[in-house]
Amino acid sequence: MRILITGGAGFIGSHLCERLLSEGNEVICLDNYFTGRKENVFHLMDDHRFELIRHDVTEAIFLEVDQIYNLACPASPVHYQYNPVKTVKTSVMGAINMLGLAKRVRARILQASTSEVYGDPEIHPQTEEYWGNVNPIGLRSCYDEGKRLAETLFMDYHRQNAVDTRIVRIFNTYGPRMLENDGRVVSNFIVQALRGESLTIYGTGEQTRSFCYVDDLVDGLIRLMNTEADDLHLPVNIGNPGEFTMNELANEVAKAVGKDVNVVHLPLPQDDPRQRQPNIERAQSVLGWSPRVPLAEGLKKAVEYFRPRVSSEQ
Ligand code: NAD
Ligand code: UDP
């Protein structure tokens, strides 16, 4: 198959490019390099089935492809809040452009949505039926509401134009190729621990997240794209249900790095969700998917990626 991956030079996208190429597909990686890097896909450049295009999803593009994974969008709060108007345009106009392409060439298209559509959730763990608790005018809303509107567009193109759509709600994912300055908690803690700096815990550190290793996530994305079932245009949660407070995560990172660490408490960002844990029964029953990599093991792999990068800074 010929497969388009928007945001393919980013953290998750680059792992997806690698995996789809290894399965014998042609891969077109499209990216504007806002948070992605050519370095993430350099090792794929010699493969004649791999193509890299610098392009912004807010502009239309015409390609002949069989499948589209629409991942283009900054994912870290630091990056998506840097230019919030652009974040909304990327989610909304990006979805319209990619759905238009999917409609024209009759490609199946998968949208990388997010657990952020649940906002600060009032039900726990979160099932796909939950409508969410999102502040529409807060600092996170450019991302949360942008992704919610993208879901709306996916559902409407499916109902109105019979586009073959998939929506995955991705929960916090980590692993090699996150940016050192990404701002997300796992990369922050690992890089801080390796540099011998204090780990920055926002608020009390009692808020929770559930962390999925990137290989498990990519496996879930590919299964969702390639499974046939009548209701698979409806959203599916993909994440690891193991739930940790940020204080617990700091301890796990210290263990993975093999060092004692100090922590410093900084103010909690606005609208920071207090808890988050996926209910993955739907992914388990429809896709036969469950995460395999426990946090301690995944953190070790991420530490091995960051260690040489941090030592080369000295
Ligand atoms: P990332 O920032 O590493 O990757 C996003 C990629 O999209 C980057 O390569 C960036 O340059 C590219 N991009 C951004 N705006 C673009 C535009 N207008 N046109 C073209 N390319 C553009 O983030 P990631 O963690 O790899 O996330 C990938 C996708 O998964 C995103 O859509 C994100 O919202 C979603 N997601 C990720 C997580 C997570 O924990 N990593 C959780 C939920 C959802
Ligand atoms: N966080 C933290 N220290 C950091 C970065 C983040 O304590 O250096 C907290 C943040 O406040 C949030 C959690 O870690 O409660 C996850 O943050 P991240 O930005 O990784 O993801 P998101 O909030 O989008 O789930």
Image (cartoon, rainbow, N blue to C red):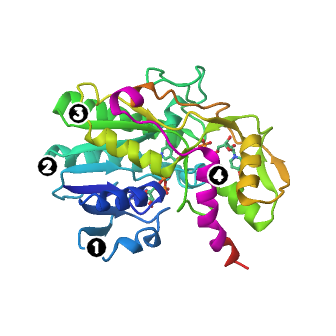
- The residue pinned by badge 4 equals 186
Using the image, determine if residue 126 lies above or below residue 26. Answer: above
SS of the residue at dot 2? helix
Depth check, mark 4 against mark 2: the one in front is: 4
Q: Earlier in the sequence, mark 4 or mark 2?
A: 2
Quadrant for ligand 2 reads top right
Task: Say whether mark 4 is within 8 Å of ligand 2.
Answer: yes
- Alpha carbon separation for disc pair 4 and 2: 39 Å
Indicate the position of residue 147 as horizontal and vertical percent values.
44, 39
Which amino acid, mark 1?
A: Asp
Q: Earlier in the sequence, mark 1 or mark 2?
A: 1
- Image quadrant in which you'd find residue 314: bottom right
- Which image quarter holds the N terminus? bottom left
**Can I make out residue 184 in this image?**
no
Q: Are the residues tagged 4 and 2 within 8 Å (C-beta)? A: no
- The residue pinned by badge 1 equals 47
Using the image, determine if residue 240 lies above or below residue 9. Answer: above
User: What segment carries the magenta color?
Assistant: 284-309
Depth check, mark 3 against mark 4: the one in front is: 3
Q: Residues within 10 Å of mark 3 (few under 14, many from 20)?
A: few
Q: Earlier in the sequence, mark 3 or mark 1?
A: 1
Q: Residues within 10 Å of mark 1 (few under 14, many from 20)?
A: few
Which amino acid, mark 3?
A: Glu
Depth check, mark 4 against mark 1: the one in front is: 1
Which amino acid, mark 4?
A: Val
Residue 285 among those drawn in magenta: yes
- Alpha carbon separation for disc pair 3 and 1: 30 Å
Looking at the image, which is closer to me, 127 or 163?
127
Instruction: Return the mark for residue 228.
Output: 3
The residue positioned 49% from the left and 53% from the top of the image is 74
The residue positioned 65% from the left and 30% from the top of the image is 275
- Alpha carbon separation for disc pair 4 and 1: 31 Å
